[in-house]
Amino acid sequence: MARHLLLLDQDGVLADFDGALDEVLRDLGHDPTLLERTAWDYAKDVERHFGIDAVRALDDAWRAPGFFKRLDVIDGAIEAVEELLALGFDVAVCTAPSSENPTCASDKLWWVDHHFPSLAGNVVLATDKTLVHGDLLIDDRPWISGLRRPTWQHLRFATKDEGPFADELSIDSWSEWRTVADLLDTGLVAA
Ligand SMILES: [Mg+2]
């Protein structure tokens, strides 16, 4: 039987994009814990709580060269990836580089090399993830669409205070990596 292929989104699943933006808010004197998040793209929430200047500061921050190289690793991600590899699953990173940040694509490749050397040869940069083959895609984005019906099933990685998601497949931290292994094992996804 073919080994099951797990695809991992980078920002919000492996790399702590939101944590870096929280730092920007703190530098502006705001308390990011006060932010009531109502949507995956929380620009409107930031504007409502902290004003349009905070939104502009966040946009400037993530568009700055080098931003994606400096992101911290999400808690438990390294250990979870090692466990899943040890169980015999194939694991690859599947990430959409931003065209609005001139060093995003190269920074993302550097970041995986640096923090996840065991995945360094298995990175796909794709603006349309439906074109990438796999069995399960873990991604924090709520909806993923593109030119094809995906071969993978989407497992949502919930961030911050989003969720729980009664109507969709989700985990909210890497402490739930066994759920991922179970999903791959039990054939919820066709082999
Ligand atoms: Mg993401």
Image: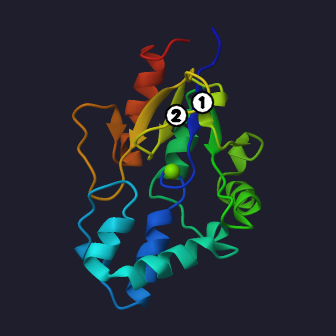
Residue beneath the point at 67% across and 68% down: 69
Query: Are dots 2 and 1 in contact, CB under 8 Å?
Result: yes
Identify the residue under disc 2.
Answer: 145
* Number of other residues with Cα within 10 Å of mark 1, as a class: few under 14, some 14 to 19, many 20 or more: some
| Disc number for residue 75 | none
Q: Secondary structure at mark 1?
A: helix
Residue 121 is left or right of residue 185, and the answer is right
Q: Give, as a three-letter code, the residue at label 2.
A: Ser
- Give the position of the N terminus as an image quadrant: top right
Identify the residue under disc 1.
Answer: 130
Q: In the picture shown, does residue 181 fall above or below 9?
A: above
Percent x, y of residue 141: 45, 46
Front one among 185 and 146: 146
Q: Mark 1 or mark 2, which is nearer the start of the sequence?
A: 1
| Mark 1 C-beta to ligand 1 under 8 Å | no
Residue 153 is left or right of residue 132, and the answer is left
* Number of other residues with Cα within 10 Å of mark 2, as a class: few under 14, some 14 to 19, many 20 or more: few
Quadrant position of residue 102 = bottom right
Percent x, y of residue 65: 70, 74
Percent x, y of residue 139: 48, 42
Residue 101 visible here: yes
